[in-house]
Amino acid sequence: MLRSPEESRKRATPEREPLVRGSLVRLRRRCGKPNCHCHDGQPHLTWALSCSLKGKTKMLCLRERDLPPVRRALDRYRRAAADLEGKALRGIQILAQQIRADKRKE
């Protein structure tokens, strides 16, 4: 049975949901309008996703409604990175065991 793209997105499993690498940061900025409260007082608070791409830090300003899905995507990335690190370490252990076993046979 074929599903529309909307149905597919609604039925997305955690494995199919996006991963996002980076950090959430809160920016404090002044807009520059002379009559705005930020001119003399408190600056505007804005959430942003900070990420390093090709050695340069990029900032993507987020809306309040973007925060929950971005937080979930960041969490999925952290879990996937930890899982991959664990698999890589197990691979090194297996390789070391194989090398030791081969040396004993020689």
Image (cartoon, rainbow, N blue to C red):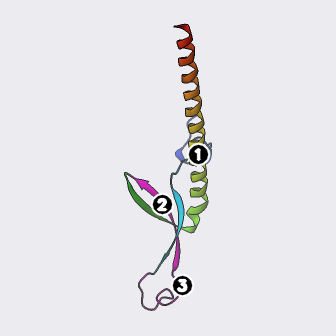
In the rendered image, which quarter is residue 2 located in? top right
Q: Percent from the top left, x then y, of residue 71?
A: 60, 57
**Amino acid at pointer 1:** Glu
**Quadrant into which the N terminus falls:** top right
> Quick one: SS at disc 3?
loop
Q: Which mark is residue 42?
A: 3
Q: Residue at x 42, y 87 (%)?
A: 33
Q: Percent from the top left, x then y, of residue 6?
A: 55, 48
Instruction: Measure the C-alpha gap from mark 1 to mark 3.
Output: 44 Å
Q: Observer-nearest residue: 63 or 31?
A: 31
Q: Is residue 69 left or right of residue 57?
A: right
Q: Observer-nearest residue: 85 or 95?
A: 95
Q: Which residue is mark 1?
A: 7
Q: Earlier in the sequence, mark 1 or mark 3?
A: 1
Q: Earlier in the sequence, mark 3 or mark 2?
A: 3
Magenta-colored span: 31-53
> Quick one: SS at disc 1?
helix
Q: Which residue is mark 2?
A: 50
Magenta residue check for 47? yes
Establish if 51 lies above or below 92: below
Q: Which mark is residue 20?
A: none
The crowd level at tag 3 (other Cα within 10 Å; few <14, some 14-19, many 20+) is few
In the rendered image, which quarter is residue 101 located in? top right
> Quick one: SS at disc 2?
strand
